[in-house]
Image: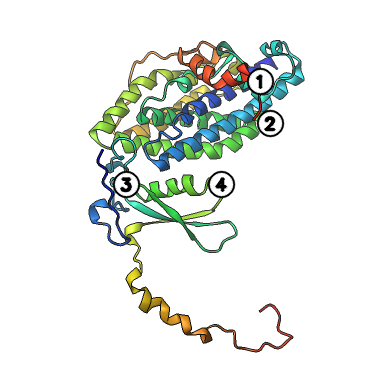
Amino acid sequence: MKIQIRKFYYGDIPEEYSGGNEMKTSQVPPPAGGGGGGLAWPLWEVFIRSKQGLDHKHAGSLHAADAAMAIENARDVYTRRQEGVSIWVVESKNIHASNPDDAESFYEPAADKVYRHPGFYELPDETKHM
Amino acid sequence: MNQLINYTLHLADTTLIIAQRNSEWCAHGPILEQDIAITNISLDLLGQSRNFYQYAAKLINAAHAPFPLEREGGEASEDSLAYLRTEREFKNLLITELPNGDWAQTILRQFFFSVYQYGLYEQLHKSGDEQLAAIAEKSLKEITYHVKWSSEWVIRLGDGTEESHTRMEKAIKALWQYTGEFFIPANFEKEVFSIDYEVLKKNWQTKIETVFTEATLSIPENVFMHTGGKTGNHTEYLGYILAEMQHLQRTYPNAEW
């Protein structure tokens, strides 16, 4: 059996693999046969806000035909153990990421700038909870 | 009292058997996300059936009524009610015991059943029996999601490709003849609560029509409706389900793990 795996980087997913809100759920056929839904349905990134949390945190990704289905899938996959009270989904192709090749110029210059941490102030004894 | 026990067992058996059927999809769903969705629904229904069995066991033990279970000795429990009753004692709806068929047939059955269950539990909720009302109220939150999930699938497949549309039509042909049983009350149903079956049926039909219209599917006419599940006259399929589900408890009584 010949298996073809195609990997897309974020932001590089061609239009024909995209879903998006403009498409009606009913127009999108489910993936043919069992499994292999990867190419038929676009990838979505899921963000979950927990009960205590103030912000939505990235939980993972999943496949869905449209945004409504992505939210329902996220509900079933990522909140079944009470992990969250709010869900955001965004199609993976709409996320733009920094390029790993830029790591040297992006992140390394910060390595020797310890003075950017506020660790050089002497605190008076009366100051608490810092 | 016996009729209330029968009624509770009917609710318990129905939710147990459809949970058991849906659980057969575990690890066989069309995609990972939907595999989890259908098994989550299965677990919701299993949870509901446990609540009903626990209540039925309580009623049976309190009544000391002559009941088939006494032949096993000891007290009734949710486990003995699920694992030690025979096919003729099960009061589940016929539609719940039918084979899953393909994905279209499974989601259509869930849709028919969840819409019916929603209407029924709304009325149970006001039935006057505190325990049943409480279970119904708790379950309605889950059922609301089941209705949403399954109706979206009916629309997705009905108004999808030629292939998916054909499969939905085939599923309707297979299942429609079992939907009449929802609205034909057995004696125990008539004697326990005054459920308004006319309203139940009307609301059910309205919802089915709305979703079918959007899904470009049509409702069959003049179909003979099968009955019997509520009174223990089942299709040939229930025996096989029980054999698989009960064999461990029957082979090794009181086994625990």
- Distance, label 1 to label 2, CA atoms, is 24 Å
In terms of image quadrants, where is residue B218? top left
Question: Does dot 4 land on a helix, a strand or a loop?
Answer: loop
Chain letter behind tag 4? A
Estimate the x, y position of residue B25 in percent, counting from the top left.
44, 31
Instruction: Look at label 1 and name its amino acid.
Output: Ser
**Does residue B192 appear in the picture of this structure?**
no
Where is A34 relative to A115, above or below?
above
Color scheme of the displayed model:
rainbow
Circle 4 residue: A81
Mark nearer the viewer, 4 or 3: 3
Q: Do the residues labelled 4 and 2 touch (CB within 8 Å)?
A: no
Chain letter behind tag 2? B
- 4 and 3 marks on the same chain: yes
Instruction: Look at label 2 and name its amino acid.
Output: Glu
Mark nearer the viewer, 3 or 1: 3
Circle 2 residue: B130
Estimate the x, y position of residue B17 in percent, counting from the top left.
52, 24
Q: Are marks 3 and 1 in contact (CB under 8 Å)?
A: no
- Tell me the number on the disc at residue A100: none
- Distance, label 4 to label 3, CA atoms, is 25 Å
- 4 and 2 marks on the same chain: no
